[in-house]
Image: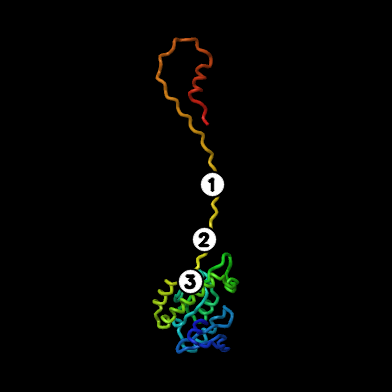
C-alpha cells in the first residue's frame, strides 16, 4: 500500500478515529491499520460501514506463509488459514467475500510463523518479495477496473518464487553381500564300462563311493 501511495502521489495520514493511516484518490481508499495484527478489522469495518463499501469491493493485502518468497496470488473469499488479521476482518465484516492479494514469504521449518514474519528476510528472499510487490502493482490498474480475472492471469503467470533448496537425502549403505563360492563344475559322466573281474569286497568301499559322488553341501 505504501508503494501504491507513493506511485500515485496519495498522502497517507494518521487518522485516530480509524486507528490507521488513510489516503484517498477518487473512489479509492487506502487503509493501513496501526493496531495489533489481530485487530486489523476495526479500521476496515469502520471505514467500509461509513462509506457503504461491500466486502466484494475490498482488497486485503497480507503476507502468506504457504507461498514461497516471490509468489503473489489473488483470490476472493476462502478460509483464513490461521491468519489473525484475516480472522478479525472476516468477523467484523461478517463475510469472507473480500478479495485478497497474498504475498508469499515462505514458511519456516518447525515454527508457527509468529516470530518469523517479524524478522528481516535474507537478501535473496527480500529481492523476490520486492519483485512480487512490483508485479502486483502492475496488475492493480486492471483490478481497479474490475478486470479481476485478467489481473489474476497476468500476475499468476509472471511470478518467480524462490524455491527452497532441495535436501540431499542420505542413503543408507547397502549391506555388502558375500561373494558366493563358485559352483563346482560337474564332471562329465563316463560311459558305463564292463564290470571288472569280481574281487573280494573291502569293508567301507560302497560307503566311500557314495560320499565321493554326493559330496558335502556348502
Viewer-proximal residue, 19 or 133? 133
Asked whether the beta carbons under mark 2 and mark 3 sit within 8 Å of each other, the answer is no
Pick whichever of labels 2 and 3 is earlier in the sequence.
3
Q: Could you tell me how far apart the alpha carbons at marks 2 and 3 are, in whole angstroms?
A: 18 Å
Asked whether the beta carbons under mark 3 and mark 1 sit within 8 Å of each other, the answer is no
Q: Secondary structure at mark 1?
A: loop
For the image, the number of numbered tags is: 3
Q: Could you tell me how far apart the alpha carbons at marks 2 and 1 are, in whole angstroms?
A: 23 Å
Pick whichever of labels 2 and 1 is earlier in the sequence.
2
Residue at 41 percent of width and 74 percent of height: 154
Residue 22 higher or lower than 197, as above or below: below
Q: Determine crowd level at label 1: few under 14, some 14-19, many 20+ residues with C-alpha closer than 10 A.
A: few
Query: Which label number is shown at residue 174?
Result: 1
Point out residue 192 in the picture as x, y percentages from the top left corner. 40, 18
Pick whichever of labels 3 and 1 is earlier in the sequence.
3
Q: Secondary structure at mark 3?
A: loop
Task: Answer whether residue 18 is visible to the viewer in this image.
Answer: yes
Residue at 57 percent of width and 78 percent of height: 37
> Where does label 2 land, which residue?
166
Query: Which label number is shown at residue 71?
Result: 3
Q: Quadrant of residue 110?
A: bottom right
Q: Could you tell me how far apart the alpha carbons at marks 3 and 1 are, in whole angstroms?
A: 41 Å
Point out residue 184 in the picture as x, y percentages from the top left corner. 48, 29
Q: Determine crowd level at label 2: few under 14, some 14-19, many 20+ residues with C-alpha closer than 10 A.
A: few
Amino acid at each position: 500500500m505504501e508503494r501504491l501511495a507513493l506511485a500515485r502521489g496519495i498522502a497517507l495520514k494518521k487518522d485516530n478515529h480509524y486507528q490507521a493511516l488513510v489516503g484517498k484518490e477518487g473512489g479509492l481508499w487506502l487503509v493501513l491499520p496501526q493496531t495489533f495484527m489481530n485487530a486489523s478489522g476495526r479500521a476496515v469495518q469502520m471505514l467500509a460501514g461509513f462509506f457503504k463499501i461491500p466486502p466484494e469491493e475490498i482488497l486485503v493485502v497480507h503476507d502468506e506463509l504457504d507461498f514461497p518468497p516471490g509468489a503473489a496470488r489473488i483470490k476472493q473469499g476462502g478460509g483464513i488459514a490461521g491468519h489473525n488479521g484475516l480472522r478479525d476482518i472476516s468477523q467484523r465484516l461478517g463475510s469472507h467475500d473480500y478479495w485478497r492479494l497474498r504475498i508469499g514469504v515462505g514458511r519456516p521449518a518447525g515454527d508457527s510463523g509468529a516470530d518469523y514474519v517479524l524478522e528481516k528476510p535474507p537478501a535473496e528472499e527480500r529481492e523476490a518479495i520486492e519483485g512480487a510487490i512490483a508485479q502486483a502493482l502492475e496488475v492493480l490498474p486492471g483490478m481497479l477496473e474490475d478486470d479481476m480475472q485478467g489481473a489474476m492471469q497476468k500476475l499468476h503467470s509472471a511470478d518467480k518464487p524462490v524455491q527452497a533448496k532441495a535436501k540431499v537425502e542420505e542413503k543408507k549403505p547397502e549391506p555388502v553381500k558375500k561373494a558366493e563360492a563358485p559352483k563346482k563344475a560337474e564332471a562329465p559322466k563316463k560311459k558305463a564300462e564292463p564290470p571288472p573281474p569280481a574281487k573280494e569286497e573291502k569293508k567301507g568301499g560302497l560307503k566311500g563311493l557314495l560320499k565321493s559322488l554326493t559330496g558335502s553341501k556348502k
